[in-house]
Amino acid sequence: MPEIEVNLTLQFSGEQELDLPASKLDAVLQKLGVKGGKIKFGICRGKLKLKLVNCKMPLEKTALYDEFKTSMELEVQEETGSEGQIGWTAGGTLGSNPSATGTGTVGVKLSDKTTQKLKSAAWQVHKTGGEFDPQWQFENKTEQAILRGLLQQELLGAIEGDAMPYDCEATFEASPDDVRLTWGEVMWTKDITRTKLAVIERAIALKCIKPQLKQPMSEVRWQHG
Protein backbone atom coordinates (compact mmCIF):
# COMPACT_ATOMS: atom_id res chain seq x y z
CA MET A 1 0.00 0.00 0.00
CA PRO A 2 1.24 3.54 -0.74
CA GLU A 3 2.96 5.80 1.74
CA ILE A 4 1.48 9.30 1.81
CA GLU A 5 3.00 12.42 3.30
CA VAL A 6 0.81 14.56 5.55
CA ASN A 7 1.51 18.31 5.44
CA LEU A 8 0.13 21.12 7.59
CA THR A 9 -0.76 24.71 6.79
CA LEU A 10 -1.67 26.62 9.95
CA GLN A 11 -2.18 30.35 10.46
CA PHE A 12 -2.75 32.46 13.56
CA SER A 13 -3.44 36.17 13.21
CA GLY A 14 -3.03 37.12 16.84
CA GLU A 15 -5.45 39.24 18.82
CA GLN A 16 -9.23 39.43 18.67
CA GLU A 17 -11.38 42.11 20.29
CA LEU A 18 -14.59 41.51 22.21
CA ASP A 19 -17.03 44.04 23.68
CA LEU A 20 -18.12 43.67 27.32
CA PRO A 21 -21.23 45.86 27.67
CA ALA A 22 -21.93 46.60 31.32
CA SER A 23 -25.61 45.73 30.81
CA LYS A 24 -24.73 42.17 29.73
CA LEU A 25 -22.21 41.26 32.42
CA ASP A 26 -23.31 38.35 34.60
CA ALA A 27 -23.48 38.46 38.39
CA VAL A 28 -20.04 36.85 38.87
CA LEU A 29 -18.20 39.52 36.87
CA GLN A 30 -20.21 42.31 38.48
CA LYS A 31 -19.36 40.96 41.94
CA LEU A 32 -15.66 40.94 40.97
CA GLY A 33 -15.92 44.64 40.18
CA VAL A 34 -15.84 44.51 36.36
CA LYS A 35 -17.81 47.41 34.89
CA GLY A 36 -17.56 46.63 31.18
CA GLY A 37 -15.38 47.81 28.32
CA LYS A 38 -13.46 45.95 25.62
CA ILE A 39 -11.06 43.04 25.97
CA LYS A 40 -8.40 41.74 23.64
CA PHE A 41 -7.36 38.11 23.70
CA GLY A 42 -5.58 35.43 21.73
CA ILE A 43 -4.71 31.74 21.78
CA CYS A 44 -1.49 30.92 23.63
CA ARG A 45 -1.85 27.16 23.27
CA GLY A 46 -3.67 24.70 21.01
CA LYS A 47 -3.60 21.03 20.04
CA LEU A 48 -3.65 19.47 16.57
CA LYS A 49 -5.09 15.92 16.61
CA LEU A 50 -5.15 13.26 13.88
CA LYS A 51 -7.51 10.28 13.95
CA LEU A 52 -6.43 7.59 11.47
CA VAL A 53 -8.51 4.66 10.19
CA ASN A 54 -7.03 1.83 8.05
CA CYS A 55 -3.67 3.55 8.34
CA LYS A 56 -1.09 4.73 10.86
CA MET A 57 1.77 7.20 11.19
CA PRO A 58 4.80 5.20 12.44
CA LEU A 59 6.85 7.07 15.03
CA GLU A 60 9.98 6.81 12.89
CA LYS A 61 8.11 8.60 10.08
CA THR A 62 6.69 11.37 12.28
CA ALA A 63 8.05 14.88 11.86
CA LEU A 64 8.15 17.52 14.63
CA TYR A 65 8.97 14.61 16.94
CA ASP A 66 12.54 15.27 18.00
CA GLU A 67 12.38 16.55 21.59
CA PHE A 68 15.18 19.01 20.84
CA LYS A 69 13.23 20.60 18.00
CA THR A 70 11.13 22.89 20.17
CA SER A 71 10.81 25.92 17.91
CA MET A 72 9.80 26.47 14.31
CA GLU A 73 10.24 29.14 11.69
CA LEU A 74 7.05 31.10 11.06
CA GLU A 75 6.08 34.06 8.98
CA VAL A 76 4.72 36.95 11.03
CA GLN A 77 2.34 39.39 9.41
CA GLU A 78 1.92 42.70 11.21
CA GLU A 79 -1.03 45.04 10.68
CA THR A 80 -0.13 48.72 10.49
CA GLY A 81 -3.63 50.15 10.02
CA SER A 82 -6.15 50.89 12.74
CA GLU A 83 -9.31 49.51 11.17
CA GLY A 84 -10.75 46.03 11.48
CA GLN A 85 -10.48 43.25 14.02
CA ILE A 86 -7.88 40.50 14.00
CA GLY A 87 -8.97 36.89 14.13
CA TRP A 88 -7.15 33.69 13.25
CA THR A 89 -7.54 30.92 10.71
CA ALA A 90 -6.43 27.32 11.07
CA GLY A 91 -6.59 24.74 8.33
CA GLY A 92 -4.90 21.68 6.95
CA THR A 93 -3.71 20.29 3.64
CA LEU A 94 -3.15 16.54 3.57
CA GLY A 95 -1.14 14.39 1.18
CA SER A 96 1.80 15.00 -1.14
CA ASN A 97 -0.76 15.46 -3.91
CA PRO A 98 -3.78 16.53 -1.85
CA SER A 99 -7.26 15.63 -2.99
CA ALA A 100 -8.97 17.68 -0.33
CA THR A 101 -8.28 20.72 1.80
CA GLY A 102 -10.10 22.42 4.62
CA THR A 103 -9.95 25.52 6.74
CA GLY A 104 -11.74 26.87 9.77
CA THR A 105 -11.97 30.47 10.86
CA VAL A 106 -12.42 32.22 14.20
CA GLY A 107 -12.79 35.97 14.13
CA VAL A 108 -12.58 38.04 10.95
CA LYS A 109 -10.03 38.67 8.22
CA LEU A 110 -7.58 41.51 8.45
CA SER A 111 -8.48 44.71 6.65
CA ASP A 112 -6.48 45.55 3.55
CA LYS A 113 -3.56 47.45 5.04
CA THR A 114 0.18 47.59 4.57
CA THR A 115 1.82 44.53 6.11
CA GLN A 116 5.36 43.58 6.97
CA LYS A 117 6.53 39.99 6.83
CA LEU A 118 9.22 38.91 9.26
CA LYS A 119 10.83 35.64 10.24
CA SER A 120 11.12 34.51 13.83
CA ALA A 121 11.12 31.34 15.91
CA ALA A 122 8.36 31.47 18.50
CA TRP A 123 6.23 28.34 18.77
CA GLN A 124 7.06 25.46 21.02
CA VAL A 125 5.89 22.08 19.67
CA HIS A 126 5.36 18.94 21.73
CA LYS A 127 4.43 15.62 20.12
CA THR A 128 2.12 13.18 21.95
CA GLY A 129 -0.27 10.36 21.06
CA GLY A 130 0.34 7.10 19.24
CA GLU A 131 0.57 5.81 15.67
CA PHE A 132 -3.20 5.90 15.13
CA ASP A 133 -3.87 9.17 16.98
CA PRO A 134 -0.80 11.43 16.77
CA GLN A 135 -1.10 14.88 18.36
CA TRP A 136 0.97 18.06 18.37
CA GLN A 137 0.60 20.77 21.00
CA PHE A 138 1.59 24.29 19.98
CA GLU A 139 2.41 26.74 22.73
CA ASN A 140 3.91 30.21 22.76
CA LYS A 141 6.42 30.44 25.62
CA THR A 142 7.93 33.74 24.57
CA GLU A 143 7.13 37.31 25.56
CA GLN A 144 4.79 37.53 22.56
CA ALA A 145 2.21 35.75 24.80
CA ILE A 146 -0.12 34.51 22.03
CA LEU A 147 0.22 32.41 18.89
CA ARG A 148 0.51 34.38 15.69
CA GLY A 149 2.02 33.71 12.27
CA LEU A 150 2.01 31.08 9.54
CA LEU A 151 3.26 27.54 9.04
CA GLN A 152 3.15 26.66 5.34
CA GLN A 153 3.17 23.05 4.11
CA GLU A 154 5.07 21.85 7.19
CA LEU A 155 5.65 18.08 7.08
CA LEU A 156 3.90 16.23 9.93
CA GLY A 157 4.93 12.75 8.82
CA ALA A 158 3.94 9.89 6.52
CA ILE A 159 1.01 7.49 6.84
CA GLU A 160 0.86 3.89 5.64
CA GLY A 161 -1.58 1.01 5.91
CA ASP A 162 -2.59 -2.48 4.81
CA ALA A 163 -6.01 -1.71 3.32
CA MET A 164 -7.80 1.02 1.42
CA PRO A 165 -9.27 3.52 1.83
CA TYR A 166 -7.08 5.50 4.20
CA ASP A 167 -9.23 7.78 6.32
CA CYS A 168 -7.86 10.76 8.22
CA GLU A 169 -9.61 13.30 10.43
CA ALA A 170 -7.62 16.33 11.62
CA THR A 171 -8.90 18.74 14.28
CA PHE A 172 -7.43 21.76 16.04
CA GLU A 173 -8.71 22.47 19.55
CA ALA A 174 -8.23 25.13 22.21
CA SER A 175 -9.97 25.49 25.59
CA PRO A 176 -10.63 28.53 27.81
CA ASP A 177 -7.42 27.61 29.65
CA ASP A 178 -5.57 28.14 26.35
CA VAL A 179 -6.80 31.73 26.05
CA ARG A 180 -4.64 34.62 27.19
CA LEU A 181 -6.02 38.11 27.71
CA THR A 182 -3.94 40.96 26.34
CA TRP A 183 -6.60 43.18 27.93
CA GLY A 184 -7.61 46.36 26.10
CA GLU A 185 -9.97 48.81 27.82
CA VAL A 186 -11.63 47.07 30.76
CA MET A 187 -13.24 49.13 33.51
CA TRP A 188 -13.32 47.86 37.08
CA THR A 189 -13.38 49.10 40.64
CA LYS A 190 -10.21 50.54 42.18
CA ASP A 191 -7.58 48.66 44.18
CA ILE A 192 -7.61 45.40 42.21
CA THR A 193 -4.98 43.00 43.60
CA ARG A 194 -2.89 40.73 41.41
CA THR A 195 -4.72 37.70 42.81
CA LYS A 196 -8.12 39.21 42.07
CA LEU A 197 -6.94 40.19 38.60
CA ALA A 198 -6.12 36.54 37.89
CA VAL A 199 -9.61 35.57 39.08
CA ILE A 200 -11.16 38.21 36.80
CA GLU A 201 -9.13 36.95 33.84
CA ARG A 202 -10.32 33.39 34.47
CA ALA A 203 -13.95 34.51 34.85
CA ILE A 204 -13.82 36.50 31.60
CA ALA A 205 -12.35 33.50 29.77
CA LEU A 206 -15.11 31.20 31.04
CA LYS A 207 -18.08 33.58 30.88
CA CYS A 208 -17.29 35.66 27.78
CA ILE A 209 -14.73 33.94 25.58
CA LYS A 210 -15.67 30.26 26.03
CA PRO A 211 -18.97 30.70 24.10
CA GLN A 212 -16.90 32.01 21.17
CA LEU A 213 -14.66 28.92 21.07
CA LYS A 214 -16.17 26.46 18.65
CA GLN A 215 -14.94 22.91 19.30
CA PRO A 216 -13.13 21.82 17.32
CA MET A 217 -11.97 25.21 16.08
CA SER A 218 -10.97 23.67 12.75
CA GLU A 219 -11.72 20.28 11.21
CA VAL A 220 -10.57 18.51 8.04
CA ARG A 221 -11.55 15.04 6.81
CA TRP A 222 -9.65 13.31 4.04
CA GLN A 223 -9.89 9.90 2.36
CA HIS A 224 -7.48 8.22 -0.06
CA GLY A 225 -8.19 5.17 -2.19
Image (tube, helix red, strand yellow):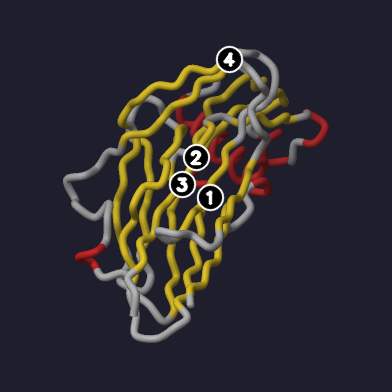
Number of marks in the rendered image: 4
Residue annotated with mark 4 = 114
- Callouts 2 and 1 close, C-beta under 8 Å: yes
- Callouts 1 and 3 close, C-beta under 8 Å: yes
The residue shown at (43%, 61%) is 95
Which of the image's four quarters has the N terminus? bottom left
From mark 2 to mark 3, how far is it between C-alphas? 7 Å
Q: Amino acid at mark 1?
A: Gly
Provide the secondary structure element on which disc 4 rests: loop
From mark 1 to mark 3, how far is it between C-alphas? 6 Å
The residue shown at (49%, 33%) is 198
Q: Earlier in the sequence, mark 2 or mark 4?
A: 2
Provide the secondary structure element on which disc 2 rests: strand
The residue shown at (60%, 21%) is 184
Residue annotated with mark 1 = 91
- Callouts 2 and 3 close, C-beta under 8 Å: yes
Question: x and y percent of residue 103 in the render?
Answer: 59, 51
Provide the secondary structure element on which disc 3 rests: strand
The residue shown at (27%, 55%) is 63
Quick one: label 3, few (<14), some, or many (20+) residues within 10 Å? some
Circle on res. 157: none
Q: Is residue 138 above or below residue 16?
A: below
- Callouts 4 and 3 close, C-beta under 8 Å: no
> For residue 2, which quarter of the picture?
bottom left
Q: Is residue 5 above or below residue 77?
A: below
Q: Amino acid at mark 4?
A: Thr
Q: Amino acid at mark 3?
A: Thr
